[in-house]
Amino acid sequence: MACPICTKASVPQYRPFCSRRCADIDLGRWLRGTYVIPGQPLDDLASDREGDEKNRDGGLDSRGKRP
């Protein structure tokens, strides 16, 4: 299996990568948001808005927060 970052042969210790460097590059891409799963933005989902309304009248998050 080739490393998805540099296409060198992968090393079992860092599989599917060839080195820690390539694994760190991949992690950095995830953290910066370079890799994105396509779909509708979370802000536009109706189920999220319904969940917020349910918590207004009771539930785990309805209790006042301590200062």
Image: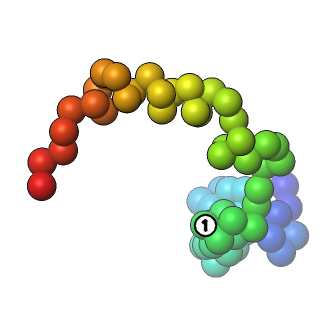
Q: Please indicate, yes or no, whether residue 48 appears anywhere in the rendered image.
A: yes
| Residue topped by disc 1 | 31
Specify the quadrant of the image occupied by residue 49. Answer: top right
Q: Please indicate, yes or no, whether residue 19 appears anywhere in the rendered image.
A: no
Q: Residue at x 83, y 48 (%)?
A: 38
Specify the quadrant of the image occupied by residue 27. Answer: bottom right
* Three-letter amino acid code at the position of disc 1: Leu
Q: How has the structure been colored for display?
A: rainbow
Q: Residue furthest left?
A: 67
Closer to us: 29 or 21:
29
Q: Residue at x 77, y 56 (%)?
A: 36
Q: Residue at x 81, y 43 (%)?
A: 39
4 relative to 48, above or below: below
Q: Element at badge 1?
A: helix
Specify the quadrant of the image occupied by residue 67. Answer: bottom left
Q: Residue at x 79, y 43 (%)?
A: 40
The image shows residue 61 at horizontal and vertical percentages of 30, 32
The image shows residue 6 at horizontal and vertical percentages of 83, 75
